[in-house]
Image (cartoon, coloured by chain):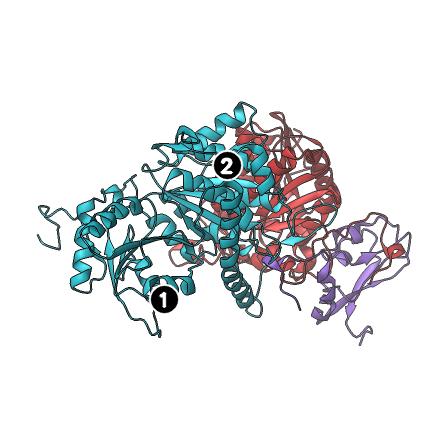
């Protein structure tokens, strides 16, 4: 008997968010995130969640509303994708700089132009410099599990973290899909996640000035503080995952999931739902006698360099597969993975592949192709799955 | 440290001395008067601009009340979030929310967020300090820069007579949102300003108050004339003072329409409108603006 | 000096900044002859540094006064003069 209910991903995520007791929710419609906020809107309208639901005039305002509410001392939630995330990007950086532990879901979608509403990971990956913790989920169950952990990680008092957390899930593939999801009860969530206890807030009984400006004599220190705090958050992320696993009886991976990696000579590194397809190929290749594995990165920021080195240093070939590209350079995830091995004894061949942009399916054939190509030669930012029969103006026509 | 008995009969130090506004700054005076009327039980949201910069350089803050600055264009949205947090925790009766910014952040970059806040009916008082240009970045033209004013991005030259557009009527935009209270005020009339802020804060729902504040640096006026210049703007009819409460307009009368020339010639930003032969044609255009305001709002009793 | 999370600061710290040092020319001199305690000088000082508790008691705190001259300009009975910084004429 499988525990849980058959739920559409967006419904599960909305219910999980409601269980975390946000008091102010604000979001703006954008495909494929809209479903989540529609569900939350209904939950509030039915009186099942005591919260203010603010329908704003744009994503910049959605992020600003939750910034204000969190500064006033209450837990919040927002959600966006693609163009909306880019529009609120100024506020995203502002929230991190102001050390407000906002939690949001980014439903991954490609960026314009041209307009494309389908999934890839470009939008959240663009935000990797912002000072937000970024966690990538493989399926709806994990999205919900990470959402609960996100509030706990960001609000952690012991090391004065106060960092915002972005939980990322692949648009359409996850929120729109139906999956059996096991959601905890309100009592279980309350036992795991205590009420938000701000270190600083806007309070007439104890006035503070928030958002002061810092001149050259002060600003650099604030960025250093953020950098060091993000590093300090790595063990907290692992600890919260362990707590989650023991509280709810379901594995949560913390920084990354290792699937058949330990004796692998070729290791794929990837994030998000395409890991599912990759695991199928790994199993198939293993059956054929190849020593292949996949390391599914969950925590992309802070980037767990040390832990990754330990996990990957035994491999000869590392095959990074990502749904994003830093145009004019390389794949961002591949670039980060290469940095793990700078100046280190182990020197695996690290190849980078770009797949699945704009909702293009990542097929088992694509994965097989990338693995075998990487095993023969070094590749960088190799686009896999391009249509051969198209004329590309300025390129081949 | 100042002793309690040295305070005057009104306690008005919620914007503390030691801020780095220019001498004679109309906006710093208006901000102090607003807080004096509002009292300690307020949370203030401020946009980027002169007021924010001269009062909140880390670690010195001039603000004695809870105060937050986020970005340039999201003041109204941040205030909406704070109001929502207070509402859901049952503190909205006790704590009032003020969102404030300059004319640039109000009429231009922040207008969308303001419109959203007014439309959604948040219980927030929005205050615009109108010094008629982007002063903090060095006097650039904004949507509230008046006709023919010199700014660095609307300078008079061989092919131009300065700013070629009239002021955007933001108070009427606020009225169009159907909010309970909209008012214009001037730092030249501090007690009227005080009355309007108190009245606004006593009303539940979104309110908009626009305050005319001279900027000695940007307007090219003598710092000691800040109050006089502000009063002249009102008494020429160029800056009509009025309130719109539940859609009903109540304009404040002026004794007579002072010729606009008397107001313009005191300011370097209008110097190009005068030459050795006196006032140029454009001054007549500005007089027409004043006359239209007088007519439209019934500022002079016939 | 401590850098707090999010550069959060506490109230009134600006008072360490003695803006009186900005004055280069004139400062206000309260004659205390004709004052009617209308309080307009205290009301319209942008620095909030004018104090008084009744007729002929008003003064400007010279630690903060920037010498803008608004008070001398608005006093309805002319009881405030702007005098050279040194305090004496000639």
Measuring from the top left, give residue C20's x and y in whole percent. 74, 67
Looking at the rendering, which quadrant does residue B91 occupy?
top right
Location of the N terminus of chain A (image quadrant): top left
Dot 2 falls on a residue whose secondary structure is: helix
Q: Give me the disc on residue A370.
A: none
Tell whether A143 sits left or right of B300: left
How many C-alpha atoms fall within 10 Å of the one at disc 1: few (<14), some, or many (≥20)? many
Q: Chain of mark 1?
A: A
Report the residue at 44% width, 54% height from top.
Answer: B154
The residue carrying mark 2 is: A17
The one nearer the camera, B101 or A374, is: A374
Measuring from the top left, give residue B196's x and y in whole percent. 70, 37
Looking at the rendering, which quadrant does residue C31 occupy?
bottom right
Dot 1 falls on a residue whose secondary structure is: helix
Visible residue check, residue A22: no
Distance CA(mark 1)–CA(mark 2): 34 Å
The one nearer the camera, A334 or A247, is: A247
How many C-alpha atoms fall within 10 Å of the one at disc 2: few (<14), some, or many (≥20)? many
Q: Give me the disc on residue A340.
A: 1
């Amino acid at each position: 008997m499988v525990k849980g209910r058959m739920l559409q991903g967006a419904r599960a995520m909305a219910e999980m968010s409601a269980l975390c007791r946000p008091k102010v929710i604000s979001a703006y419609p954008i495909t494929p995130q809209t479903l989540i906020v529609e569900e939350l809107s209904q939950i509030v309208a039915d009186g099942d969640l005591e919260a203010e639901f603010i329908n704003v005039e744009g994503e910049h305002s959605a992020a600003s509303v939750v910034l204000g509410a969190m500064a006033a001392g209450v837990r919040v939630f927002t959600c966006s994708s693609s163009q909306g995330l880019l529009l609120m990007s100024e506020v995203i950086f502002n929230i991190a700089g102001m050390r407000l532990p906002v939690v949001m879901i980014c439903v991954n979608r490609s960026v314009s132009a041209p307009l494309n509403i389908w999934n890839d990971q470009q939008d959240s990956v663009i935000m990797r410099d912002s000072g937000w913790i970024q966690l990538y989920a493989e399926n709806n169950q994990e999205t919900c599990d990470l959402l609960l952990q996100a509030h706990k990680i960001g609000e952690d008092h012991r090391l004065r973290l106060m960092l915002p957390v972005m939980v990322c899930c692949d648009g359409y593939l996850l929120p729109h899909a139906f999956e059996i999801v096991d959601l905890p009860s309100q009592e279980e969530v309350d036992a795991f996640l205590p009420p938000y206890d701000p270190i600083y807030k806007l309070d007439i009984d104890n006035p503070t000035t928030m958002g002061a400006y810092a001149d050259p004599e002060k600003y650099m220190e604030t960025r250093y503080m953020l950098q060091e705090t993000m590093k300090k958050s790595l063990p907290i992320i692992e600890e919260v995952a362990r707590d989650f696993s023991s509280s709810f009886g379901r594995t949560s991976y913390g920084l990354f999931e290792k699937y058949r990696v330990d004796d692998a000579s070729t290791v794929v590194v990837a994030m998000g739902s395409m890991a599912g397809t990759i695991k199928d190929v790994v199993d198939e290749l293993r059956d054929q006698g190849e020593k292949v594995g996949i390391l599914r990165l969950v925590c992309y920021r802070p980037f767990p360099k040390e832990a990754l080195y330990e996990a990957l240093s035994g491999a000869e070939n590392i095959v990074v597969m990502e749904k994003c590209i830093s145009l004019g350079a390389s794949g961002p995830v591949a670039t980060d993975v290469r940095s793990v091995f700078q100046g280190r004894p182990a020197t695996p061949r690290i190849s980078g592949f770009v797949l699945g942009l704009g909702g293009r399916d990542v097929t088992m054939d694509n994965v097989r192709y990338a693995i075998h190509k990487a095993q023969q030669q070094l590749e960088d930012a190799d686009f896999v799955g391009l249509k051969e029969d198209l004329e590309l103006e300025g390129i081949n026509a | 440290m100042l002793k309690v008995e040295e305070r005057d009969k009104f306690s008005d130090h919620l914007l503390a001395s030691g801020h780095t506004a220019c001498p004679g700054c109309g906006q710093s005076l208006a901000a102090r008067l607003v807080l004096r009327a509002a009292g300690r039980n307020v949370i203030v949201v401020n946009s980027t601009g002169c007021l924010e910069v001269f009062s909140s350089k880390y670690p010195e803050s001039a603000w004695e009340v809870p105060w937050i600055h986020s970005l340039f264009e999201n003041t109204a949205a941040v205030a909406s979030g704070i109001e929502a947090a207070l509402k859901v925790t049952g503190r909205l009766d006790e704590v009032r929310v003020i969102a404030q910014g300059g004319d640039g952040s109000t009429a231009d970059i922040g207008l969308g967020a303001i419109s959203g806040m007014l439309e959604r009916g948040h219980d927030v008082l929005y205050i615009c300090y109108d010094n008629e240009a982007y002063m903090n970045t060095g006097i650039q033209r904004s949507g509230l820069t008046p006709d023919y004013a010199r700014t660095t991005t609307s300078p008079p030259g061989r092919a131009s007579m300065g700013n070629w557009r009239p002021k955007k009527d933001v108070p009427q935009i606020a009225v169009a949102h159907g909010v309970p209270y909209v008012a214009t005020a001037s730092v030249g009339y501090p007690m009227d300003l005080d009355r309007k802020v108190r009245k606004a804060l006593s009303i539940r729902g979104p309110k908009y108050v626009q305050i005319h504040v001279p900027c000695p640096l940007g307007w090219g006026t003598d710092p000691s004339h800040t109050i006089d210049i502000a009063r002249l703007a009102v008494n020429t009819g160029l800056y009509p003072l009025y309130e719109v409460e539940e859609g009903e307009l109540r304009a404040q009368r002026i004794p007579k329409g002072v010729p606009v020339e008397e107001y313009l010639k005191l300011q370097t930003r209008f110097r190009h409108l005068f030459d050795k032969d006196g006032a140029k044609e454009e001054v007549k255009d500005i007089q027409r603006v004043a006359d239209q305001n007088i007519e439209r709002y019934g500022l002079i009793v016939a | 000096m401590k850098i707090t999370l999010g550069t959060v600061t506490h109230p009134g710290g600006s008072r360490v900044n003695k803006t009186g040092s900005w004055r280069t020319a004139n400062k206000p001199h309260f004659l205390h002859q004709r004052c009617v305690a209308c309080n307009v000088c205290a009301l319209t000082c942008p620095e909030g540094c004018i104090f008084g508790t009744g007729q002929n008691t008003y003064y400007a705190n010279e630690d903060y006064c920037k010498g803008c001259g608004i008070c001398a300009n608005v006093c309805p009975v002319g009881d405030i003069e702007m005098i050279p910084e040194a305090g004496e004429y000639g």
